[in-house]
Image (cartoon, rainbow, N blue to C red):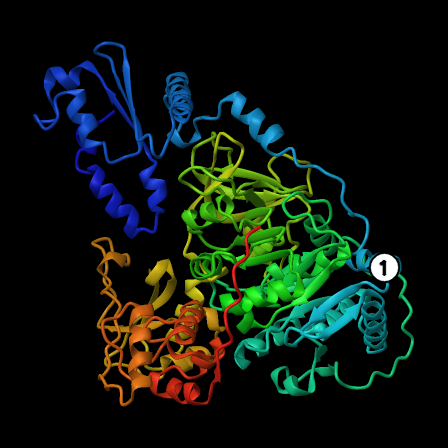
Amino acid sequence: MPVKESLHLPVDRMRVLADRHGTSPSAVARAVVLLVLSRWVFEDDPLGGVAQTFGELLDRASSFDSGFSLSEVDGEGNAWLETDLIDSVAVARLAEVCALALDGVARDAAQRPGRVDLLPSVDRQRILHEFNDTAAPFADDVGVHELVQARSARTPDAVAVESGDVRLTYGALNRRANRLARHLRGLGVGRGSLVGICLEPSPDLIVAVLAVVKAGAAYVPLDPGYPAQRLDFMVRDTDLAVVITSSALSDRASGTHQVLVDGALSVADDTDLPPIAGPTDLAYVMYTSGSSGTPKGVMVEHRSICRLVDGNWFAEVTEADAVAQAASFSFDAFTFECWAALASGARLVILDRDVVLDAQKLKAAVRRHGITTMWVTASLFNQHLAECPDLFAGMKTVLYGGEAVDRSAADGLVAGPWAPTSVVNGYGPTEATTFTACHRVRPDGGSTMPIGRPIANTEVFVMDRQGDLVPVGVPGELWVGGPGVARGYWNRPELTAERFVAHPFMAAGARVYRTGDLVRWLPTGELAFLGRIDRQVKIRGFRIELAEIESVLTAHERVIAAVLDVREGPAGARHLVAYYVAPEPVEGLTEWCQGRLPGYMIPGVFVRIDSLPLTPNGKLDRTALPAAGAASRYTAPRSQVEKTLAEIWAAVLDVPLVGITDNFFELGGQSLLATQIVSRIRRELGVELRVSQILDAPTVAELAEHVATAKPAAPAIGRRRR
């Protein structure tokens, strides 16, 4: 081993380089240092007196979590570990891996180090046959709509959908969906067709979703809150011939034949249609952020949904349950909410977005509707529990995911007096149909929050760059297999071939999805999430390709170059910061992005720079990007209301001073922080505002006008212990 050639790269420099190249800090922090020292190290002193004993060498490497040193001097080795981060069992396993590495090199010194087999046979057996022992019966021979249709026949008078005071029984839901499906069939819609749905959360939306799959087609969610340019791209990309919408939203999906849910249908026949779509037909195409600058449509089949909602252990839904429909229609958590409820005969309770974002309003809705099962993003989970610790009291299952959760918040909930029956951390990309792995949170579960073990009929493999299994405890890319894996990307054959690859352990034809997520196996058979191997990030549960936002910014005629970064604000809230190169500040970049990107992809802060900082080898140096901060002329409050609002904004947004014309978004604001402002306004000014009012009136001066006309706040619902 050429020790002298490696001396120029000390440990601290490795950390800096890893950070600049986007390597996960967790992956670096858990790196194992292997020091192979022969007698000549000490006899000839090639280290130049810098470190002449094992003790000094270990001190120099002590910033790592664990490591080993081996010496030919006494034939012995040493190991050190950080007991708060890695246990002695894991160190013993890593020692075994090191022994395999040395044995492999000794057997064939000419082979590349990366090709040495480091997987102990016991690990291979555990990973393939124990950790992935997930096979379970599920409805793999029908379309998902047939499960709902069977429920409608069994309990036609049971409530299927509830929204405010509106209730729709299973019988009524099925009949309305049958009429709409027959109308779609009359328009030429059939097996393999794609039908857009552009509706607000409502019973009509659920009827439309069920009708499309009954007609044999797949639905394409078109969120009416998306910019027109993005909706137009999705309509063109899928070549939609029909879009289901309402009179109020008819201008959001122009250029196609529209079926209005609030209009008259020409079909009166509401009887069940014969099955048209089967388990391997498409059920929906859902668009997610794309690294090429345009969104990509994920194609999901019926059997993938059935695998998610039928016979799983992480959230058992029955006829006695009420499931909250809180996620956006364009977010894959909707898949679980909608189909898990309807396939099980439960009530699906539709909640307005303002209710979901406000802890007190959400608690009132949970109590009013008797909600037993709910999914929220990790950010909302953290924030709502801080404001309303008894929010989930009496509930059966609370699922969260999408981002890292505050471990203390989760532990405090499950150990406290208002704990629901089950709290579940759920992980999964859209390409694997909502959930891939889940972890039931328990008190005193350790310092890290696992993403869990694979759900039923799901396989997970942790692979190295060569596509080989890595040992337990070693970081690698997560590959997902099983019937939950999507068919691929709509109209993107090259990207599909890159991300959906041949299954490494099954017969020809089986595939796995390469997630791009960096994980490692825990000895318990659960997975720990370490970060990303690319530039994809998650904001409020949505996976975002930063390159797509950069592409939108550089399309502006005055922007020469752009780079996106993610920063953490108050209470760990993450927001996007856009750095752009231009000769002078460019006004209106927020509006430019709003016309082309969904709200969760709009940068909160725009920072002009003269040029992109580069490393000596010509790559972007993210550590040299300037700190993000709003630079605007300060305008003092003119009234007591404006003064109070400015103080609330400063506290929530963690900025020293807020003027009445400062923009909420440019100060780093986003919808989760807006919910905190609504709560503070309720407490300090005694009035009730909606989150949307803050987003629509993004200055203190504008918001003060809403306060002047707002209704008095309702008294908070008292806490109740189990």
Q: Is residue 617 above or below residue 627?
A: above
Q: Position of residue 134 (x, y in %)?
A: 66, 36
Question: Does residue 96 appear left or right of residue 493 in this picture?
Answer: left
In this view of the protein, which residue sits in the foreground, 64 or 166? 166
- Tell me: 711 left or right of 487: left
In this rendering, is residue 258 above or below 404? below
Q: Which residue is mark 1?
A: 155
Please indicate whether residue 359 sits to the left or right of residue 114 in the image.
right
Q: Nearer the viewer, residue 221 or 582?
A: 221
Total labels drawn: 1
Q: Residue at x 51, y 64 (%)?
A: 289
Give the side of residue 563 with respect to residue 319, left or right: left
Say which residue appears at 66% left-offset and 61% top-offset.
370
Q: Amino acid at mark 1?
A: Thr
Q: Residue at x 61, y 83 (%)?
A: 252
Q: Can you tell which quarter of the image residue 434 is in? A: bottom right
Instruction: Please state the horizontal and vertical placement of residue 538, each as a whole percent of the image.
Output: 45, 58
Image quarter of residue 302: bottom right
> Does residue 599 sit above or below 373 in this rendering?
below
Identify the image quadrant of the N terminus: top left
Check the image and report above or below for 227 versus 43. below
Most distant residue in the top direction? 74
Quarter-wise, where is residue 251 in the image?
bottom right
> In terms of secondary structure, where does tag 1 sit?
loop
* Residue 6 percent coordinates (x, y): 21, 33
**Label 1 crowd (10 A; few <14 / some 14-19 / many >=20):** some
- In front: 644, or 132? 644
Decide if residue 661 is in sight here: no
Residue 614 in sight from this viewpoint: yes
